[in-house]
Amino acid sequence: DSRTEKKQMADTFLGEVIPLWRIHNLGTCSGSTQNIVNIARPDTISLLRHLGGGTNPLLATGRLVLAADYKIDPKTLREATLVRIEKVFADPTGKETLNAELIVLCKCRIKDVNTADPFPHARRLPDLVPLWRIHNFDTIRNCLSEGDVNIESISRSDTVSLLSALGAGDVTRATGHLVMVCNYKDTLGAGMDAVLARIGKVSEGDPPLTCSLRMLGRVRCVEVTTTEGPFPQTLMDMVPLWRIHNLATSVRTEHKITNIGRPDSIGLLKHLGRGDPLAAVGCLVIGCDYKTLPSPRESATLMRITAVRGGGQGTYDAELMEVSSIVAGAVCVDESRADWWPRVSVELPRVWSKPASPSSVSPVLPRKPSSNPPAAVTRSTKTATEEVPKSLSIVRGVTAKNASDCPYWQRCFKVLVDKFLNTGYQFQDFHMQDADRCFCNDCHRLRGDSMVYKRADSDYILPVGFARIGVKVLKSSVISKKGFESWHICYHGTKFDYVSDLLITGHLLSPGSSTYLGGKIAVREGHIQGSFSRRNDHTGTKETFDPTNKIFLSPTVRYCDYKGVYMSEHMVMGKHYRCALQVRFQPDTYCIGQETVNATEQIDPYIPNKSIEWYTTELHTHFFTGVLVAER
């Protein structure tokens, strides 16, 4: 009956059941790496085998688990640490044990701990989002079409406490965090209206403060608590899933949907508009193609309804704007009602900072992996041990598939090859198959790679989400193997139209240079166009900075891909592609400085914004090792 149906939906929404890994000396610093050695306890081996598909514990790479200190009785647990298994491998010394590398994500609430064999598991409750109660909420809600709104004269203790908690004691570092905004006069409770927003720049100094908010969309609250801190916190209701024919998603893309007449779509709009489909404007939905449903833990696209109009004959027209990628949680589907629609609980993207002290705010999971933190995460390493039993059988060895076997890599490779057809050159002349590697999410998880690596004492971030097509090193760029290994790894964003010229030349071109195919390199739109004096945040010194005579690179491809300043999208068969170059850069031939793309948030969680841009006027101190292509 309907009561049973509602209870089942409520139970589904309460959270997902996750294995509980009990670990000695567990470290809980968000963003830190924890090495677990001498894994041999039967409950832990059973847990890893379960996550690895039932047989092979080495395939548990990429899975999430709840971790708790071994000394704490599981039945009394109300909080655990969510961790991601980065790598599982056999002990290199030959012991019949396993080792693992974990990334600590966040603290989270749990309930219903089940200690049954072979390992315990618990229900992870959805994360609470801070609730910001604001006067003149109607004015804020009406600004959804503009997206941004400024909040002035912030002095109430609950609001200042909220910003301070999100910024780990520094209100200016609350930038990028998500909050739920509601009317200060509203009675707090389930079913209340709110607006999901992202905090922009917060002014420095003592109150009163000023702050900007990026309004993402209207949502409803299903749980509000006022007992866990100086400000209320809330749980966002499940988001309706709008299944649309031939929907191609790309963040910040606008979609026009016409002749909306299906009962499920009409029912969805009426629900959001509380009976009036035209009043659904500003509400958030998750958009997906009609033929597919997102699975739990898959990436999905959050969209805001920007317009709804009557289309005649009982149909409607609507416009949608994509606002963010999210991770899907539980999916509820009711096939018994024609006017019903699927709903999805979401794990909201959340910025990360290393807190000075534990915050009372329950953090929300970061996006895959592109969340935008306010400060770089300091990766610390701790080691824990487990006792070794007398005998244990372990499955050894996992062989990852070749890059050319991955459909994602194949599509990216074809797009690159096709762009060479009109240049008079064949890409095969530059291709080095031994250097091919796919960094799509599936291949990255299968290999169990870390995100950060070091080359010659310089960190670089793996280009997860891109396919690397290896290229040959030109003879003029050949150096000794020892020298090759000592040069730093970095990335340079570019256009597909420039790739052939750059590969032919063998090095990057500074603004003003002419290309082999007759083009002219210019300072990209949206970037600084002339010389000026500035303070270099990386070195702390003053310098004259002129971007018109330099080439720019970065140790993270996320900077190259930030808001399209360095990359341009190329559309093929309804999909968007963008490209960059993987580069080896000679040490001591370049300068390091802060970002110059007017970023309002941390661009990469592992590289601080003050050190994210590398630049030089020397054109022959680098060479290419691969072309990176990503599909959006």
Image (spheres, rainbow, N blue to C red):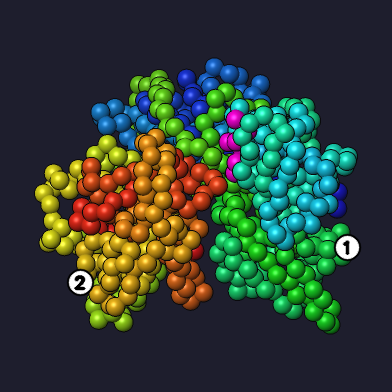
Whether the magenta-drawn stretch holds residue 6 is answered as no
Proximity of marks 2 and 1: CB atoms separated by less than 8 Å:
no
Q: Earlier in the sequence, mark 2 or mark 1?
A: 1
Q: Which residue is mark 2?
A: 429
Camera-side residue of 614 and 307 = 614
Residue under the point 79% across and 39% down: 133
Residue under the point 54% across and 39% down: 374
Q: Amino acid at mark 2?
A: Asp
Q: Which residue is mark 1?
A: 275
Q: Is residue 621 visible?
A: yes
Measuring from the top left, give residue 450's x and y in whole percent. Answer: 38, 42
Q: What's the magenta region?
A: 170-176
For residue 104, which numbered disc appears in the image? none
Question: How far is mark 2 from mark 1, CA to CA?
Answer: 62 Å
Residue under the point 45% across and 58% down: 527
Measuring from the top left, give residue 201's x and y in whole percent. Answer: 61, 43
Measuring from the top left, give residue 271's x and y in whole percent. Answer: 82, 60
Among the 4 quarters of the image, the one containing residue 381: top left
Q: Amino acid at mark 1?
A: Gly
Residue under the point 60% across and 30% down: 170
Among the 4 quarters of the image, the one containing residue 414: bottom left
Whether the magenta-drawn stretch holds residue 175 is answered as yes
Measuring from the top left, give residue 564's x and y in whole percent. Answer: 48, 61
